[in-house]
Amino acid sequence: MGSTVAEQEVEERNVNKRNLRGMKLFAGNANVALANRVADYLGIQLGQMTTSRFADGEIQIKIEESARGNDVFIIQPTCSPTNDNLMELMIMLDAFRRASASKITVVMPYYGYARQDKKIKPREPITARLVADMITMAGAQRILAIDLHADQIQGFFNCPVDHLYGGPIIGNHLIAQGLKGREDVVIVSPDVAGVGRAKALAEMLHTSFVVIAKRRPRPNHVEVVEIVGEYKDKICIFIDDMIDTGGSIIGGANALLERGAKDVIATCTHPVFSRNATHRMQESAISQIISLDTIPIHEDQIVPKLTILESAPLIGEAISRIHLNQSVSSLFHDWR
């Protein structure tokens, strides 16, 4: 009897693991737990590196093994404390470049400073481009990221960018909950910019989507202007790239429920969760909070409504394919 597609995929992945010669995986301090899970998926050990600080707080990096001629992958999301993690990444890049690594790929499950991706008002910076310039000038030759805040950020880098999507992981979790193909389920985009993400998840669940039009009078404050689409008497599933303070999601959930929605589920790729966001959502009318583990979630942010999904298999598979010069985009043939 021939093997199934799933068995062939497992066999191919195991072969890939045996052929990861010349590759080394290192991790900064931003999300060590995730880095360990990625290493476990790949069947390799994290590279040895020591991070310390001088008396005045400056970061010191020492690579404890040879990287000469190796294909080096550095896992370091630039999450809070953003400035420390970003500076640590810069120093790691310089260290590996001077250690004669053949290629350096930065694996950034979460890309910080991405929300200022265009100039809206006079004298505003474009921090997404600034950070991209810093990373490439420090020595990055390739970037691997999950759900960048805006697609155009890929063009800010003067090196190849492999852009992964967290939506399929969330979608498979929702399918396992029995939410596929139901007429009383609708996907919600919290703003116009997220329509593509909402549309892709809606297609995966065989349902429709709605869009919330809103305005931001100031950062982290949102006012719902209008909701476009059919949502009355339905389970509304928000999908966003990140949840920060939770203000947008809670405000949108209240607006939907006040106008006739049956239930609200909040999902995101990046659990930024500032200012006790999870506790605010726990006390709100939102029934579930679902996120990936691209950013470490502190124990005091864990609440009963929160479900954390693993991103390590996706990241590990992408790293393997990059090293072996295989297609990464084929991971998302069902996600548009």
Image (cartoon, rainbow, N blue to C red):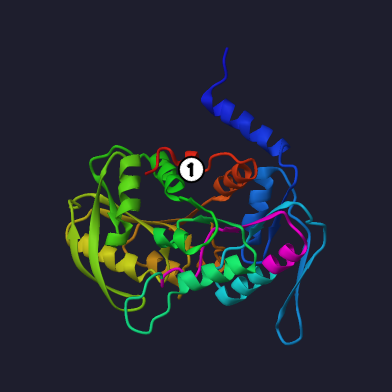
Q: Residue furthest top?
A: 1
Is 18 displayed left or right of 87 in the figure? right
What residue would you read off at disc 1? 329
**Per the image, is 39 magenta?**
no
Observer-nearest of 311 and 199: 199
Q: Secondary structure at mark 1?
A: helix
State whether residue 278 appears in this view.
yes
Residue name at image x 72 percent, y 36 percent: 18
Name which residue type carries label 1.
Ser
Residue name at image x 75 percent, y 51 percent: 70
Residue stretch in magenta: 92-116
Observer-nearest of 243 and 94: 94
Is 149 displayed left or right of 15 in the figure? left
> How far across and how far down the image is residue 267, in percent?
39, 56
Q: Residue furthest front?
A: 158
Q: Residues within 10 Å of mark 1 (few under 14, many from 20)?
A: some
**Per the image, is 109 magenta?**
yes
Q: How many marks?
A: 1
> How far across and how far down the image is residue 250, in percent?
32, 67
> How far across and how far down the image is residue 20, in percent?
71, 41
